Amino acid sequence: MIRKLKRAAAILCLSASLLTAGCGSSEEQTASSGQFSSFVATAMDGTSIDQEILKNSKVTMLNVWATFCGPCLNEMPDLGEIASEYDSSDFQIVGIVLDAIDSSGEIVQSQVEKAQGLIEQTGADYLHLLPSQTLMETRLNTVVSVPTTFFVDADGNILRTVTGSKEKDDWKSIIDEILADK
């Protein structure tokens, strides 16, 4: 009986770890080019934003996060600091709030308010977007866990994808490496 309980507990632990593996784990890869060359989203203030926002910098960090994700929220203060430490013509950070729209693509105002509160609380004082349904279906359909971060050039070509959160120094190392290649 004890052996069966231990086995059941082990299976339960393994299942739980697989279900939560994406939130906070880390993986880097290069992805296909041009994936963010055309998109539309809404800024937190309701303004429509498109891919032209990428032309403001040589490299843009698109940090896809959710209001329920602890690792996302834990890294946001560092991202806020990083955003202010680089020349915006070289590098910018744009957050994308993944859970601010419902399954039909409609913006959920209560989630927007929650996200806005978390942005203020964490000091992540950079542009945050609410994805359109089209952006979700065509560009963010590969996101299986949060945070997921895409580094893109001014034309929307993906330079690198990072799954999971990182410490400030780790992010800066990645950013500096990408900028050195530009």
Image: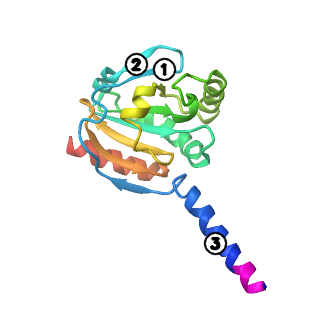
Pointer 1: residues within 10 angstroms few (<14), some, or many (20+)? some
Residue tagged 1: 43
Q: Earlier in the sequence, mark 3 or mark 1?
A: 3
Residue shown at 63% from the left, 21% from the top: 109
Please state the horizontal and vertical placement of residue 20, each as a whole percent of the image.
58, 56
Q: Please give the count of numbered marks on the rendered protein.
A: 3
Above or below for 77 versus 44: below
Identify the element where label 2 is drawn: strand
Q: Which amino acid type is shown beneath numbered disc 2?
A: Ile
Q: Which amino acid type is shown beneath numbered disc 3?
A: Ile
Residue tagged 3: 11
Residue 18 falls inside the magenta stretch? no
Please state the horizontal and vertical placement of residue 79, each as a whole percent of the image.
49, 39
Above or below for 93 versus 171: above
Residue 90 lies left or right of residue 124; in this view the side is: left
Magenta residues, dominant SS class: helix
Residue shown at 47% from the left, 38% from the top: 64
- Specify start and end residues of the magenta stretch as a single range: 2-6
Q: Which amino acid type is shown beneath numbered disc 1?
A: Ala
Say the numbered circle drawn on residue 49. 2
Pointer 3: residues within 10 angstroms few (<14), some, or many (20+)? few
Q: In which quarter of the view is residue 137 placed? A: top left
The N terminus sits in image quarter: bottom right
Residue 144 lies left or right of residue 9; in this view the side is: left
